[in-house]
Structure formats: C-alpha cells, structure tokens
Amino acid sequence: MHHPVSQRPPTDRRTCQITILSILFVLTAWQGALAALVRPLEGQGDFRAFVDIYDRERPAGLVDIVLLVTIPNTELQLTQRWGGGWKGRIATSVQLVAADGRVHARRDTLDLTALRLEDALSPTVYQNFSLTLPGIESPYGTLTVLLSDLTAGRTDAALEKASVPTTLVEGEWVRAEAIAEVRGLYIHPPLFLSGAPLNIIPDTERDIAPPRRSVLVDHLHPNRRYGLEQPRLQVTFDIERAGRSAADLDDLPRTLMIQILARDLDYVRRDTIRVLSDPQEFAAAGGRATVTWELDVNDLPPGAYQLSCAPQDGFGNSWVTEFDVLWSADAIERTSSELWLVGNLVLNGDRLGEFKKAGPAEQEVLLAQFWSNQDPDPSTRINEAEIQFRARMRHVRRELGGFGKTLALDDRGMIYLLLGPPDDIEQQVVPLNADSFDSALSTVYDAWSPLKYGSQDQPLANPDGTTIQAGRDRQNRLTSQERFKAFELWSYQSRGESLFPNLYSDVGLGVRFLFLARLSGSVYHLETTSAYDSGSGSR
C-alpha cells in the first residue's frame, strides 16, 4: 500500500539538492530487524577491504551480527572465464570473542564475478558480499575477519608452501539498543547504497543476507566513500512502531529530521521527511515502513561527515553514522596505512596531533591543506613540492630500505626525504682484520667526524689533534670490531632541498651526515651530523 509523502520545498536548489525517493508501507518485514551500525572498519594486509557491521534482532534476546564486506576489484586477482566475464574466489574466516568468553566462528568460500574487463580493472567497482554470525547473546566482543584471495595464491617452490594474499580486519563490536527499549517509533540504521534504481528498493525482499539473493546486494556501498568515487549518496532504512497499545499511537512522530554535519563543524544541512500522515492507518498496515533518501554530494567539500536521523515531533530513537567525501583520485586509491605514514612523515606539533585524532577523509583534507601551503607556484595546476616528495618516497622504497608504519626504516631514507639527494656520497666498507679495521677508523670515522668541522669551540684535544672523547669513542669501536659493517658520509654543499619545514631546513651551509651500518644487517643509522654545533640526532 502506497501513501503520499510530503516534503519541505528546498530554499535554494543549488545548496539543497535532497530528494525523497519513496516511502513504502510494507506488510512483510525484513528478515530480522537491523539495529546497530558502526563506522566501516578497514583491513590491513595485502589488499584493501572494508567491513560494515549491522545487528539483526532475533527472538529470545539473541542477535545476528551481519558483516557487509566490500573490496575494490583492483585489489583482487580476477581471471577471465569461458563464456565471458571475470571470476575469482575468496576465503573468509570470521571470529567473535564474546564478553562471556565464548568464541563464535564461521568459514566460507565465495565466488567473485565481474562482467566486463573495465569493471575488473576499476578501483571504484567493488565486490560486495555479506557474512553472518547467528545467535549471539553477549552484549559486546572482539571481532576479527580474515580474507584470503585464493585466485591470487602462488606456490613457493623453495619454501614448499602456498602464499595467499590475505587481509585482516579487526574491531570491537557492541550490541545496539533493542527495539523493546524504544517508545514511539523505532528508526533502523541505514543501508548505504550506490547507483540503486529506485524501483528495486520497494520490490526487493530487502534482506541483506545471504549474498547474491537480492538485487539490493549489488548496490550496497559499505565503505561509504562518495564524491569522485560515487556522486550520489543513497540510504534506505526501516521505521517500525515500537509500542503495541492504542495509546502508543499518539507518541508516533509524523516527521523525521535528517542532518548532515561536517566533522569540523564548518558545514551543516538539514531536511525533513514526512513519514506518517495517519498513525492509525500505519499501525493497521503492519507498523513498518521503508524510507529511501538520496543526496547529490557534488556541493560537498572533501572531508568526513556525520549523517543523523531523529524524530522531529514525537517519540523514538535516533541514529548517527558517518560517511566520507573524496575528490582526489590519489585519496581513493591510497590505503589508510599509507595515509598514516605520510602524515607522520611531514606533520609535526599540533598539526600532527590533529591528524592523529582525525578520520581518513579528514586526514586527506589536512594533508591537502599542508601541501597547498608548500606549493612553490600556486598558479600551476600541479604542486611541484608534493610531486617531488612522492618521487623521493619511491626512491626510498626502492633503494634505501623502505618504510615502517610512521617513518623510514633506514636513517638515510629519512634524510633523503627531508633534504633530497646529497651532493656527494663517500662509502667505506669496514675490513674484518684488526689492522685494516684500525686504518678504516682513521681514514673514515676520524676523518669524517663532524667535530673536525663543527663548532668553533672544540672540546679538549689529545696531542694528535683528536678530542679526548673522540679518542675514547674510537677505542670503543676498535675493541668492538664485530659490531660494524660500513660507513657512509653524505655531504650537502648548502642545506639540501627542503620541500617543507623540518628539523634540518634552517641549519647552516655545508651539512654532513655520517651513517653506520652494523654487521647484523644493511640498515644504516645516523651516527653523527654537523647540522648542529652540539652534534647528534637523526630526528
């Protein structure tokens, strides 16, 4: 049975492009009520994956945990199949360690498909599927999801074992508010969609599990990232009468308020949805309705947004969730771990503190603002400083040991990022025999020591011209020959080329860095530097 929907006319068509698509009163309910919603979790590992978490209430106080999984096609190995299309296979392992100590687990193997080569190669086309842990009694627990790309698996002949790309998604699960605890109208959390034809939403069975049984599953957008990736945000959610007595009908709200709020509070947009014209008729029709709402995000600046829905004139619960708007192609393909690394490499002080507290989309905005401030020529379409920094990162990954979570693993890599390539590099491999080692110390360490050319006020010296402390350090190295492998001296005739303010951007001319590699590996550590009169420290 269809009912008319009224909508407040927008005051400005450019700034309020919100359309209420449909409200349908339905006699058949979703298979279990959707209840809890959290921000999507992003996996860490060999490929990107996002997991959105819902609860579905069951009788006897139990709840099913439904996991909506989305993986960009470009992150997976899809192979062409006979008859057309592309296919893949993924193994899933889900585990919940509940508060009572019980372990709930399940394993599945799912087929993945892409109809066209263009879809298989697109970073904005996804594989969507759902996984369910049924019959959970606990109020909270720790959730882990392990995803393995079986199609991309390779057998390592040397190790005699298979190597399968995997990604791990971890997070805390907390059970949502039960419908029995709500007075008036129970508003279910929204399903985020993308590109869903309007006519399939009322006509589908609308259950999100099992996968591939509903057309709606093909349009789920669990990662909730819009903008360049998806220009229109679509959400659909149920409303349900929570009370059962006739008197409760007076508590039902007739209008819902939907609000979009930027996390930095610089932007807000509101809209009202007329959901009930006659509470008596609503109750007689089964006391449930499906609401579908759409937003054109083209007017939204990049960043993280809160989307909330609450009764405007009556009683009921509310929900608050988040979505991201990204307008940079680099931001779409950048993983959260790479975003975190870059932020820690270039930001410091209060900026770094703000970055660490922000969500992924906000972090992208903060980095974009940072690089905009470093742009040497804003009149051009490119930011030369940012492009050069990316080139330096590629060189560090290939030649200088790569990166950890927050910094370069080799101190040479960190100096390269901050100052660029040195004007001169001198290398000395330390010999193994004692006589040659003593000679190497004399020609390498003593000759390169920054105390020779650093401060004007030299420390106390020995008769041979070396400082007393330098002599002690040299003796310690001579008696610990097995600890050292090689030295490298990097020399900058001026101050190097700093792309942004950093520890060494304001030092004097003629900067040198002495790096030491130990025998246990090829990673170099900054031993001393002439950057400061007092001598040491890499960062």
Image (cartoon, helix red, strand yellow):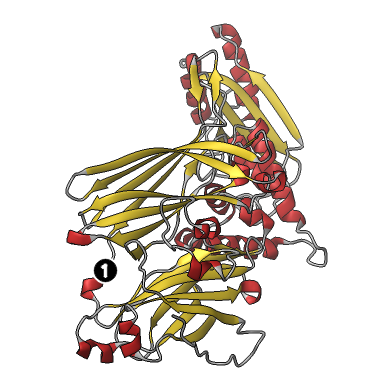
The image quadrant of residue 427 is: top right
Name the amino acid, label 1: Glu
Residue at 82% from the left image edge and 63% from the top image edge: 380
The answer, for residue 456, to whether it is visible in the render is: no
Q: Is 206 drawn above or below residue 295 in the view shown? A: above
In the picture as drawn, the residue positioned furthest to the front comes out as 1
Number of residue marks = 1
**What residue is pinned by disc 1?**
177
Relative image position of residue 352 (x, y in whole percent) = 51, 59
Is 510 situated left or right of 130 in this image?
Answer: right
The location of residue 493, given as percent across then percent down, is 76, 41
User: SS class of the residue under badge 1?
Assistant: loop
Position of residue 458 measured from the top left corner of the image (x, y, whole percent): 58, 38
Asked whether residue 360 appears in the rendered view, the answer is yes
Residue placed furthest toward the right = 380
**Front residue of 301 and 388:** 301
Q: Tell me which residue sits at (49%, 50%) in the image.
A: 212
